[in-house]
Amino acid sequence: MKRAKLLLSIPLLFAAVLLIWAVATPADDDDPQGEYPLITTITTPKPLASFDISWVDSESGRYYLADRGAAAVDVFDAERDTFLYALGGFVGNIGRNLSGPNGVVAIHKGNDSFGDDDDRGRSELWAGDGVPPGGVSTVKVIDLSSKSIVADISTGGNHRADELAYDPADKIILIANDADVPSPFVTFISGKAELCWGKFSTTEKTALPTPLAASSSPFGIDRGIGSTYPYPLRWRTRTEKLTKSIRSP
């Protein structure tokens, strides 16, 4: 019996040694690059005190950071790892759920958006903004060529316009006022015309505004139109329904 126990303990001991060796061995063999080294640290003219969402635009090689402390969106050269400039005009850090800028996204408008005879094809930065004293939430549209705000679109919220998504196929911006009281909501904005198409509450039963309720909706069949935490939305033209997921009570 003792001999049997001894023979049984040897394989167990061997397995334990292998397990310890596997845990202690670095994963360099699995990762050909090993650890990711710090290349550089990019400084900004004003130290980062409060910031939110960032966006990498691979087409232009630019990195955009919502810098609330500077009341601006900081623009970086992602190829050369340098700070370029700041795009101002936002409310800044004025309090919880009131500050801006917030969500940011860069979009590129070709002439196919407007027609061959129209020269409005340009690159733009869209950013959700907060609520100034006595005002409402807005979305700022910045022409990246002139570095100027070309549209200031109201979402009408009492708290910040926050995360946003862009559908490049149908040129639709969806932005969430996720902290609004009493009911959070999302706003649909035409990226082509820079006009609000309507709103949809995430808690109240509201009719879809025209043209969203029309059978000629610009949204494609079963095409996702973006999402915002924590309520993903999807428009289906075959059923003319906008679906959303909600939290359990």
Image (tube, grey):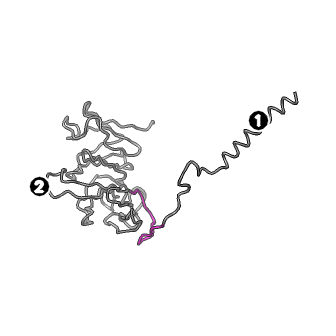
**Left or right placement of residue 10 versus residue 225 in this view:** right
The correct choice, above or below, for 247 with respect to 168 in the image is: above
Label total for image: 2
Q: Earlier in the sequence, mark 1 or mark 2?
A: 1
Whether the residues at callouts 1 and 2 have beta carbons within 8 Å, the answer is: no
Q: Residue at x 33, y 61 (%)?
A: 132
Q: Nearer the viewer, mark 1 or mark 2?
A: 1
Name above or below for residue 13 compared with residue 195. above
Read off the residue under disc 2. Answer: 117
Left of 160 or right of it: where is 145? left
At x 36%, y 37%, the residue is: 244
Task: Locate the N terminus and report the quarter of the image it occupies.
Answer: top right
Q: Which residues are magenta?
A: 40-54
Q: Position of residue 48 (x, y in %)?
A: 45, 66
Q: CA distance from mark 1 to mark 2?
A: 80 Å
Three-letter amino acid code of the residue under disc 2: Asp
Could you tell me which secondary element the residue under label 2 belongs to?
A: loop
* Residue 156 x, y percent position in the rendering: 28, 52
Report the residue at 25% width, 62% height from top.
143
Which residue is drawn at the image coordinates 66% and 46% (left, top)?
23
Amino acid type assigned to the residue bearing label 1 in the image? Pro
For label 2, the crowd category at 10 Å Cα-Cα, with few meaning under 14, some 14 to 19 and many 20 or more, is few
Q: Which secondary structure is most common in the magenta stretch?
A: loop
Identify the disc placed on residue 124: none
Crowd around label 1: few <14 · some 14–19 · many ≥20 (10 Å): few
Task: Name which quarter of the figure residue 148 lies in.
Answer: bottom left
- Residue 34 x %, y %: 56, 55
Tag 1 residue: 11
Q: Nearer the viewer, residue 42 or 78?
A: 78
